[in-house]
Image: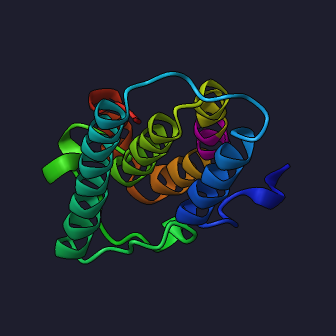
Amino acid sequence: MTSLELKIPPPLVALLTGLLMWSATRLVPPLALPGVARVAVAAVLVGVGVGLAISGVLTFKRAKTTVNPTTPAAASALVRTGVFRFTRNPMYLGLLLCLVAWAVYLSNALALLIVPLFVLYMNRFQIAPEERALATLFGDAYAAYKREVRRW
């Protein structure tokens, strides 16, 4: 099923996942979480998620490499600085944190259970093809990076 590989931009995948999560709130009643705490936790998660994503994009731009997730073969540099010292996928991790924040805000267990679908999709149809392209472009340097830094 390679037809979906690198076809749907990750922000769109996250948006569709968020819509599915919102739809789930119609099926299962919300959890009884205090409103102020729920909103505060969600806000912190969104802040960290957006910060990670922006940091990743800015680091790519400083390295003068593509930020387009649908064309990883166009990468001109293997970026290992900044936030990429801690995660190979800071933009995707940022989207994931925003989805977790959305689940917390929605206060819905079913919405939270949908979040792993985003991870599964991203691992299979976005990250795996990206890793193949980067391995082809950067060979041993990328293999070493993969050994040293986690995906998510």
User: Would residue 112 appear left or right of 117 to someone viewing this image?
Assistant: left
When asked about the image quadrant of residue 61, the answer is: bottom left
When asked about the image quadrant of residue 118, the answer is: top right
Residue 71 at x, y percent in the picture? 54, 71
Nearer the observer, 80 or 91 = 91
Give the residues in magenta.
118-124
Q: In this view, does 55 lie above or below 147?
A: below
Q: Is residue 19 magenta?
A: no
Residue 152 at x, y percent in the picture? 40, 35
Residue 26 at x, y percent in the picture? 76, 41
User: Would residue 145 appear left or right of 20 to someone viewing this image?
Assistant: left
Q: Is residue 119 magenta?
A: yes
Nearer the observer, 37 or 147 = 37
Residue 81 makes an appearance in the image: no
Q: Is residue 103 above or below residue 3?
A: above
Q: How many marks?
A: 0
Residue 130 makes an appearance in the image: yes
* Residue lying at 22% horizontally and 37% vertically, measured from the top left: 86
Nearer the observer, 21 or 96 = 21
* Residue lying at 55% horizontally and 47% vertically, measured from the top left: 127
* Residue lying at 65% horizontally and 62% vertically, measured from the top left: 6
